[in-house]
Image (spheres, rainbow, N blue to C red):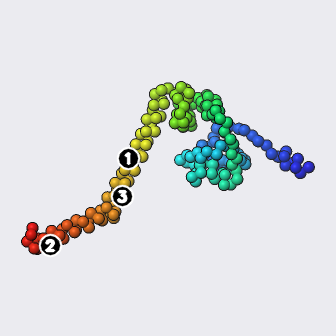
Amino acid sequence: MPMMQHIARCHCRQQVREDAPWAVTDEFLRAYSIDFVCHDALPYDHASSVSDNGGMYEHLNRAGRFIEMRRTEGISTSATSSPVLMNRLRRHSDAAGAPPTDYDEFVRRNVFRGYSAKDMNVSFLKEQAIKFGWENLQAQALAEDLQKAFVTLFDRESAFRTRWRNQRKAIRNRIGVLAKNSLC
């Protein structure tokens, strides 16, 4: 009977959690008594995840709480779930009709995955705004990197400025020697 009691306590539940974070955290798993996460083993990354170069599920894999699922060729989870999620998000718009930010993140992510504006049921202008916003962010990041590199290069204690100072002193000393010898 102990085996039957053990099996009776096991259950599998497929459930949509509207408050689920993109990067699954241990706190979220504890809050909903989730023992395992099943997903394909591709190394998905996200800025807010707890990724260690193995993707955002790596910490679950190390803890033995990740089960790899094989993907079915030709079947896209995003293509299957997009219409359902888009309708659900539209129903939960605010009073002014503006969809929540999760909706924007959802659309943005899928546009970058290659879905067209028509697939996502958004206007062409919205699609272009998303792409422009991404390019603008990339340009801002590049500008910040260049600014940091410039500051690092011309920092008072940088190797470049130290070498420049030493060269300037050497030139000044050489001119002084030449002046003493009346060659200048």
Relative placement, left or right, of 116 versus 139 is: right
Q: Secondary structure at mark 3?
A: helix
Residue at 69% x, 48% y is 66
Q: Which residue has dot 3 on it? A: 152
- Which residue is the site of mark 1? 143
Pair 2/1: label in front: 2
Residue type, label 1? Ala
How far is the residue under mark 2 from the one under mark 1? Answer: 45 Å
Q: Secondary structure at mark 2?
A: helix
- Horizontal relation, residue 94 to residue 80: left or right: left
Label 3: how many residues lie within 10 Å, few (<14), some (14-19) or many (20+)? some
Q: Secondary structure at mark 1?
A: helix
Q: Amino acid at mark 2?
A: Val
Q: Residue furthest left?
A: 182
Q: Amino acid at mark 3?
A: Thr
Q: Nearer the viewer, mark 2 or mark 3?
A: 2
Pick whichever, 94 or 17, lies toward us: 17
Mark 1: give few (<14), some (14-19) or many (20+) Cα within 10 Å.
few
Please report whichever mark, 1 or 3, sits nearer to the chain's N-terminal start.
1
In the picture of the structure, the residue carrying the numbered disc 2 is 177
Dot 2 surroundings within 10 Å: few (below 14), some, or many (20 or more)?
few
